[in-house]
Image (tube, rainbow, N blue to C red):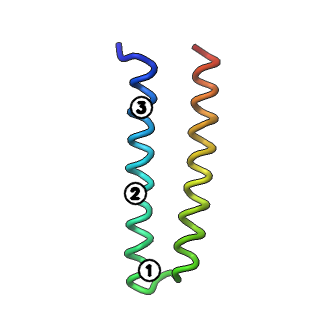
Amino acid sequence: MPSVRRFWMVIRIAFAELLIIIALLMYILQLKSVISPLQTWSLAGIFGAIAAIVLSIVEKKYRNDV
């Protein structure tokens, strides 16, 4: 069974990869003029903040349960 530390490291790596994919998608949408550059930065920031908050809540809950 993998250790808790390794588990959270894998989760953080997956989280970072997801943020990179979302950022690339927004960049492509900006290049295609679907969304404006201002929307790109604001949406990426909002998504990143929400994802970081959810990740920290899940990690705290997991650590309290274990």
Q: Is residue 46 above or below residue 54?
A: below
Check contact, mark 1 vs mark 2: CB within 8 A: no
- Judging by the rendered image, the residue that carries numbered circle 3 is 9
**SS class, disc 2:** helix
Residue 30's tag is 1
- Judging by the rendered image, the residue that carries numbered circle 2 is 20
Q: Earlier in the sequence, mark 1 or mark 2?
A: 2
User: Which residue is located at x 39 percent, y 82 percent?
Assistant: 31
Q: Earlier in the sequence, mark 2 or mark 3?
A: 3
Q: Quadrant of the N terminus?
A: top left
User: Which residue is located at x 41 percent, y 73 percent?
Assistant: 27
The span from disc 3 to disc 1 (Cα, nearest Å) is 32 Å
Q: Quadrant of the C terminus?
A: top right
Instruction: Residue 34 in the image: state x and y as whole percent.
Output: 46, 83
The span from disc 1 to disc 2 (Cα, nearest Å) is 15 Å
Q: Nearer the viewer, mark 3 or mark 1?
A: 3
Q: Is residue 20 above or below residue 64?
A: below
Type of the residue with mark 1? Gln
